[in-house]
Amino acid sequence: MPKEIFVGNIKFEANANNVVDVLEQHIKGKVIRCELAGKKNANPLHINGGYAFVTLDDDDAVDLLSRGDYNAPFCMTRSLNISEAKNKGKRKKHYMEPLTNDNGNEPIFQLSSIELGNWAGQLPIVNYKRHGKKPLPTQRWTFLWDWTYPSYYVKPTVCISKESDAILIDGFTLPSDLKNGKRIKIPIRSLIESNHGILLDVKDCDNGFISLYISLKCSPILLRKTNKFNQSSKNTRLMYCITEEEEWVRTTDWTGCVNAFGKFLVYRLTFTENLEAIRRSLNHMSIPGIPTRIPKCLVSCEEIPKDAESYLKGIFDLLPFSICFKLESLISYGIITIHEIMEYKIGDKLIDLIYDEKETIAWHALNQMTIQRWDPADDRYNRRPVEIFQIALKNFRGEYDEWHPANPNIKLKDNNRCVWINYATVTPVKIYFNGPEYESSNRILRRYSEYADRFIRVTFKEENLDRLFNEQDTDLYDLRIKKILKNGFMVAGRQYEFLAFSSSQLRECSCWFVSPDKDFNANSIRESMGDFSAIKAPALYAARMGQCFTSTISTLELEVGQIKKIPDIKRNGFEFSDGCGNISPDLANLAAKHYWGTQHDDEIPSVFQFRFGGYKGVVSVNPVLEGNVICIRPSQIKFEAPISTNLEIVKAVKNPLPAHLNRQIITLLSSLGVKDDIFIKLQNNARADIDSIIRDPQKAREIVKRSLGTRECTHVTRTILSMIEALMEDDDEPYLKGLLECKRIFALKSLRYKARIPVPQGYLLFGILDETGILEPDQIYIQTSTIISENTFNTVNSKIQRKHKVWTGPAVIARNPSLHPGDIRVVRAVDVPKLNHLKNCVVFSQKGEKPLPNCLVCIIYHCNFTIFRHNMVLYFLHF
């Protein structure tokens, strides 16, 4: 039991920490609270008033009181006088410095009810008269609610916390189960970005209660008590205090299948007690993101009919999946509500269109709602998206035989390159549905092309769609992520179950789900991938299965006679040829045509990153091979997949990518002794080049040709170069100026936040093995093939002209990504005539004690290697 004592004869220059440190040397426990009196004079050296009230455990207090004067603690050469605290209520408060405690100064108010729903729209402004006052123009809103706080729960409370930068709503538990309380945390930044993020109902204010409406951009953060406490100390010069705060952890939606916190983004909080205190608090808030004066309006509340859910399920049984999924997508983003679907008879209109074989028109009419901006607080955009549906139907009923901007009949087809795929984004509270989107295909999607709409790509993210990082919130993993991975989810009348994931998807917290149909299910798909029985490690098992989901382009069906197995080159316990095979020039030419299509370019890639059944890695062109032959080594086989005989290309390089420094490489080079002045000089040069993109046409051409990481399509690059060639940059053409400005801003952001500094004469290349055995240890061979002809619309049908160059001399080679100083090596590039057929790759020697890629902590050749050439090497070698 804590007990308070009086401590006197404290030196005026002492602070609270000085007193606490002295007392804790004479007790077994800890001081809970120490409150010094404020100073009584203007002496700047004085801090306190000479005495303090200290709170300790009862045993410690008795021990200090029993010491008396004969063994009193000393603080700054003074003996402290310790006695029982008396006249506690008669302290001179003007001598005391108040404790600065934001949490303690934030009032908590009790709520009488909570309703969750969504805005239905804004009605015309009316002049509202308030009890004899002058009528004022007031906005009118319609609020549709579907969930209310259960009456058998404890009364909820709300606190607008400046310390947490959030609105905290506590409760959601039975009176007999207070230890398992729940909390809604609404970050201020999640309120809609307008002055209508919080509204007051002026009508309710006149009727003896207050209704506060909170509008969110995304679902709130849900928390639960853990019955654990975290100790924290808050100190000032006159105050030392140890406080225990309840520990809250993230959890999932406790409303179950109702999913109230995922469906609804508008909260109605009703107050019936302490109204004056609430009004004062609302009128004097100083929290960024909340208006100082909360806007007032008239709100009409309506309950959503209970039969809306059954109406939606009924139309799902009659509509095709593509239409049902689009409706689910619109509902998940709050663009349309189930109530509106029933009120506007959207389902009946869609069914009529399907019977008239107008499914495409129906889909595009629904899609028009996604591009309709809706803001109930803005008169320009207060028209509900559902009202656009009928207008879109009228526009799309006409048949177009040729291309038209509004033509819904033109749609890209699934092929060996791309396929239409649906997306789902799972957050701790809800699921967003997107798509379908046209994305790169893979082996499984091509094999089951007739079931393409039964695949869905699922990504796990935070409520604000940021990456999910919650190591300690086990509820999110056990009750949300693990549950969905194990049990799947339902959408548009279909049940989806977990299938697999690729390596790149794993980094993005993404995976594949599939909806079963008779004999088609996740197990049958996994069985068709190949034989994984020899793999015992779970992580490796999943990685090998994900190999089938790598984005690839299907090229050629190979026969058994075209596949040759050659031995690996091994020495000293190392595989010098790990992951590297050969391909004949004729087969490489055919594969390149399938990969690139018809082009006015005679260049054939020297290296292909490929997938073939259970094989993976790279193959390099070997002129010794004749016919259509591919040579594969044992190190390239990862699992047996006899069914798949198609040569799939992951990547083929005709043009070397320019190399860039990044934070990792800069850190490693600095640790190796490279001076910072070198990086600063390169950065300044890069910034000057980027800034000149607007005013210097020649620089603009060079920078647009160079990869800036914007990943725009060739058509956009060709458009920019054609407009520059037509001297439109001199005329300040707005479209061209906007494109160049976007590239400039993106490049500057990459330079600032990622240190993405371009390296002169530096390239990002695939690594392969020297099959001739000519290269000596620490020697490499590099030949680049760069386009020198202009890539404009005037030259689109002209033959591409190239410049080939073999690089010689010292070079710095780095693995990408570089994680260790040993990942950066100094080597020598040499000219070997027998390797002149290899372009846009770095060729490593098969000689030496150890393969050079192994020295770079990379044991496979299909990693990317960054090569810094000539003057860069001179910079780096003179440190």
Image (cartoon, rainbow, N blue to C red):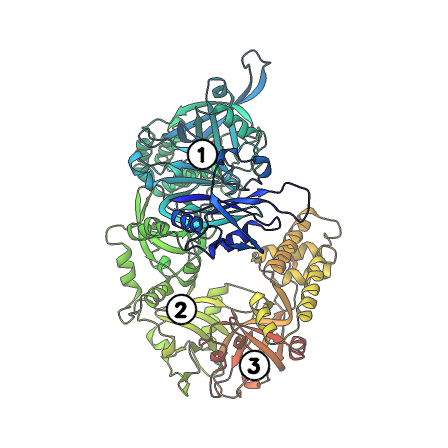
Question: Rounded to the nearest whole Å, what is the CA distance between mark 1 and mark 2?
Answer: 57 Å
Circle 2 sits on which residue? 611
Question: Rounded to the nearest whole Å, what is the CA distance between mark 2 and mark 3?
Answer: 26 Å
- In the image, residue 280 sits, relative to residue 434, either above or below, namely above
Considering the numbered disc 3 on the image, is that residue within a helix, a strand or a loop? Answer: strand
Circle 3 sits on which residue? 781
The tally of labels here is 3
Circle 1 sits on which residue? 158
- In the image, residue 89 sits, relative to residue 79, either above or below, namely above
Question: Is 244 on the left-hand or right-hand side of 802?
Answer: left
Considering the numbered disc 1 on the image, is that residue within a helix, a strand or a loop? Answer: strand
Give the mark nearest the N terminus, 2 or 3.
Answer: 2
As shown in the figure, which amino acid type bears the numbered disc 1? Val
Q: Which quadrant of the rendered structure holds the N terminus?
A: top left
Give the mark nearest the N terminus, 1 or 2.
Answer: 1
Q: Which quadrant of the structure image shows residue 658? A: bottom right
Q: In the image, residue 105 lies at what x, y percent?
A: 52, 37
Whether residue 656 is visible, yes or no, is no
- In the image, residue 472 sits, relative to residue 5, either above or below, namely below
As shown in the figure, which amino acid type bears the numbered disc 2? Arg
Question: Rounded to the nearest whole Å, what is the CA distance between mark 1 and mark 3?
Answer: 69 Å
Q: Which quadrant of the rendered structure holds the C terminus?
A: bottom right
Q: In the image, residue 215 lies at what x, y percent?
A: 49, 34
As shown in the figure, which amino acid type bears the numbered disc 3? Tyr
Q: In the image, residue 648 lies at what x, y percent?
A: 41, 66
Whether residue 747 is visible, yes or no, is yes
